[in-house]
């Protein structure tokens, strides 16, 4: 299983704002947020207080091939912006991957990770090979910087969830 880096890449939590620009959680995203909070609780992690302050907004076109971006704010809750046109065209498994990935940034403070929390040299040119990848070419973490292939999400979902909430 190889990853396709061409169409979809994800935003990262390195972007900041003083305060959210919007309010509330986009209704289409709410089930993904609820599932994330439940999965965190099942793994012994309480994110409910952060989730209550989170803002999720359906935006217009984001920069580049970015599907979503987490903005870390100084005041109020963190904010996720989703590219609405890309969101409408992707599968349910990619929506789940993107949701958990961005919520990992916004609610857990997770960055894009590989071995030791850093990128191996030539990451995007070595998709599916080397440090940070499983034997079948899937990333070891849902915090991989490129949207995962549906086969990876289906095959490794339980491992991705466990890894997401185990790294502190």
Image (cartoon, rainbow, N blue to C red):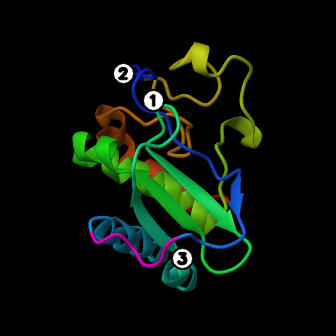
Q: At which x and y percent is residue 4?
A: 40, 22
Residue 158 within the magenta-colored segment of the rendering = no
Q: At which x and y percent is residue 23?
A: 47, 77
Viewer-proximal residue among 35 and 89: 89
Q: How many marks?
A: 3
Residue beneath disc 1: 138
Q: Are marks 2 and 1 in contact (CB under 8 Å)?
A: yes
Q: Which residues are magenta?
A: 22-27
Q: Quadrant of the C terminus?
A: bottom right
Residue mark closest to the camera, 2 vs 3: 2
Viewer-proximal residue among 56 and 165: 56
Provide the secondary structure element on which disc 1 rests: loop
Q: CA distance from mark 2 to mark 1?
A: 6 Å
What residue appears at the point 26 percent right and 40 percent down from the top-left corner?
Answer: 90
Residue beneath disc 3: 44
Specify the label residue 157 is tagged with: none
What residue appears at the point 42 percent right and 69 percent down from the top-left corner?
Answer: 39
Q: CA distance from mark 2 to mark 3?
A: 31 Å
What residue appears at the point 55 percent right and 66 percent down from the top-left corner?
Answer: 79
Q: Main secondary structure of the magenta part?
A: loop
Residue 165: name its quadrant: bottom right
Q: CA distance from mark 3 to mark 1?
A: 26 Å
Residue 40 vs 138, above or below: the answer is below
What residue appears at the point 40 percent right and 19 percent down from the top-left corner?
Answer: 2
Within 10 Å of the Cα at label 3, are there few (<14), some (14-19), or many (20+) other Cα atoms? Answer: few
Q: Looking at the image, tell me whether mark 2 or mark 3 is earlier in sequence order.
A: 2
| Residue 162 in view (yes/no) | no
Residue beneath disc 2: 1
Q: Is residue 17 left or right of residue 92?
A: right
Q: Quadrant of the N terminus?
A: top left
Q: At which x and y percent is residue 33?
A: 39, 70
Q: Is residue 38 left or right of residue 89?
A: right
């Amino acid at each position: 299983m190889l990853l396709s880096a061409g169409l979809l890449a994800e935003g990262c939590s390195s972007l900041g704002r003083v305060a959210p620009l919007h309010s509330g959680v986009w209704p289409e995203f709410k089930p993904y947020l609820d599932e994330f909070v439940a999965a965190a609780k099942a793994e012994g992690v309480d994110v409910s207080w952060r989730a209550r302050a989170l803002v999720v907004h359906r935006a217009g076109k984001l920069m580049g091939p970015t599907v979503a971006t987490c903005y870390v704010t100084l005041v109020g809750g963190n904010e996720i912006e989703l590219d609405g046109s890309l969101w409408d065209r992707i599968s349910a498994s990619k929506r789940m991957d993107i949701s958990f990935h961005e919520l990992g940034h916004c609610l857990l403070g997770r960055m894009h990770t590989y071995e030791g929390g850093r990128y191996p040299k030539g990451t995007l040119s070595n998709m599916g090979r080397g440090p940070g990848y499983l034997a079948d070419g899937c990333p070891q973490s849902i915090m991989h910087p490129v949207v995962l292939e549906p086969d990876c999400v289906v095959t490794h979902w339980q491992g991705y969830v466990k890894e997401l909430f185990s790294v502190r």
